[in-house]
């Protein structure tokens, strides 16, 4: 979990996100600076534009499960 804070027009805001990077990729350390984007009309809404989610991993697992299910059904006939 990465927690961050930022200021817009003198107001301070905070947010957090989970970054699912690979083990060999660099990760965040306390005090690191990185880009956060926010909604100018509602500055409390922000996000990290380079966020890596676990969606790709989930789709790979689903694909493997479907392939194995098809193989089992095909072999059991």
Image (cartoon, helix red, strand yellow):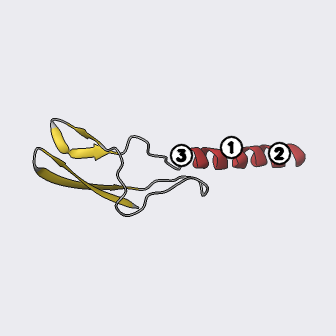
Q: Which numbered circle lies on residue 49?
A: none
Judge whether residue 77 can be spotted in this image: no
Camera-side residue of 11 and 54 = 11
Q: Residue furthest left?
A: 10
Residue at 65% across / 50% down in the picture? 61
Quadrant position of the N terminus in the picture: bottom left
Q: Secondary structure at mark 3?
A: helix
Q: Quadrant of residue 38?
A: top left
Please name which of the two marks, 2 or 1, marks the residue nearer to the observer.
1
| Relative side of 25 to 4, left or right | right
Crowding near the residue tagged with mark 1, few <14, some 14–19, many ≥20 C-alpha atoms within 10 Å: few
Q: Secondary structure at mark 1?
A: helix
Judge whether residue 13 can be spotted in this image: yes
Distance from the alpha carbon under mark 2 to that under mark 1:
12 Å
- The x and y percentages for residue 72 are 82, 49
Q: Which numbered circle lies on residue 55?
A: 3
Crowding near the residue tagged with mark 3, few <14, some 14–19, many ≥20 C-alpha atoms within 10 Å: few
Judging by the rendered image, the residue that carries numbered circle 2 is 71
Judging by the rendered image, the residue that carries numbered circle 1 is 63
- The x and y percentages for residue 22 are 59, 53
Crowding near the residue tagged with mark 2, few <14, some 14–19, many ≥20 C-alpha atoms within 10 Å: few
Quadrant position of the C terminus in the picture: top right
Residue at 49% across / 48% down in the picture? 53
Distance from the alpha carbon under mark 3 to that under mark 1:
12 Å
Camera-side residue of 15 and 59 = 15
Q: Secondary structure at mark 2?
A: helix
């Amino acid at each position: 979990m990465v927690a961050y804070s930022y200021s817009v027009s003198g107001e301070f805001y905070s947010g957090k996100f989970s970054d699912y990077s690979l083990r060999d990729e660099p990760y965040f350390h306390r005090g690191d600076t990185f880009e956060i984007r926010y909604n100018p009309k509602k500055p409390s809404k922000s996000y990290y534009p380079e966020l890596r989610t676990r969606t790709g991993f989930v789709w790979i697992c689903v694909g493997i499960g479907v392939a194995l299910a098809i193989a089992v059904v095909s072999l059991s006939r």
